[in-house]
Amino acid sequence: MRFNSSRATLACAFTSILLMPSVAQGSNDDFIGQWRAAILGKSGTDRYNLQIDISESNGELTGTTRYLDLGCGGTLTAVQNSSEQVTFRETLTRGKSKCVQGASIRLVRIQDGLTYEWLYPNGETGLQATLVPGHGGAGAAESYLTAPAA
C-alpha cells in the first residue's frame, strides 16, 4: 500500500479547521468593557440604573450585572455569540429576592453602544434599553442617563 503524504497533510489540515472555535475573530472585542443604561420599567414610571461589565476569559465572554437601584445583580455566562450579538444566562448572586432568577440577556452591537434585551426564563422579552460605554469604578452608583432608554 502506498502512502500519499499530500492527502495525509490535507486531512490533518481539514481536521484542524473543524476543531477550531466557531467564534468570529475579534468579535468579542466589541462587547468587552463597562456598559451602562437607565432603564424604564414596565410600569412606565419606575426607572433604575444598570451597569454591565463584560470581559473575556479563555476566549469566552463573561460578565457581571448590577441593577444599582434594585439592589441585585449577578454573573453572566455566554450561551451564544456571534460577531453581531451575544446572549448571556444571568445567575443572580446578590439581591436574589428582588429580581428574577434565570433570565437571559441579549446584547446586539450598534454604532455607539449595545442594545440590551432582558428576557424572562421563558424567553419572553421583559425590558429593552440602549447601553453606552461606562466610566468609573465598579462601585459607582450615579444616575447614568436623564432620559429613559428605549
Image (cartoon, rainbow, N blue to C red):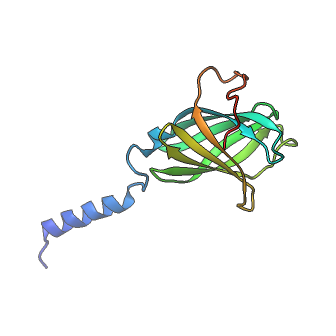
Residue 34 point in image, percent of width and height? 58, 31
In the visual, does 7 lie left or right of 133? left
- Most extreme residue toward the bottom is 1
In the visual, does 12 lie left or right of 129? left
- Identity of the residue drawn at 59% across and 23% down: 135
Residue 68 point in image, percent of width and height? 76, 30
- Asked if 38 appears above or below 8 in the picture, the reply is above
Q: How many marks?
A: 0
**Quadrant that contains the C terminus:** top right
Residue 23 vs residue 40, the one in the foreground: 40
- Most extreme residue toward the right is 97
In the visual, does 55 lie left or right of 98? left
- Identity of the residue drawn at 38% across and 55% down: 20
- Identity of the residue drawn at 54% across and 36% down: 55
- Identity of the residue drawn at 42% across and 56% down: 22
- Asked if 99 appears above or below 4 in the picture, the reply is above
Residue 37 point in image, percent of width and height? 66, 34
Residue 8 point in image, percent of width and height? 20, 67
**Quadrant that contains the N terminus:** bottom left
Residue 98 vs residue 20, the one in the foreground: 98
- Asked if 66 appears above or below 115 in the picture, the reply is above
Residue 113 vs residue 44, the one in the foreground: 44
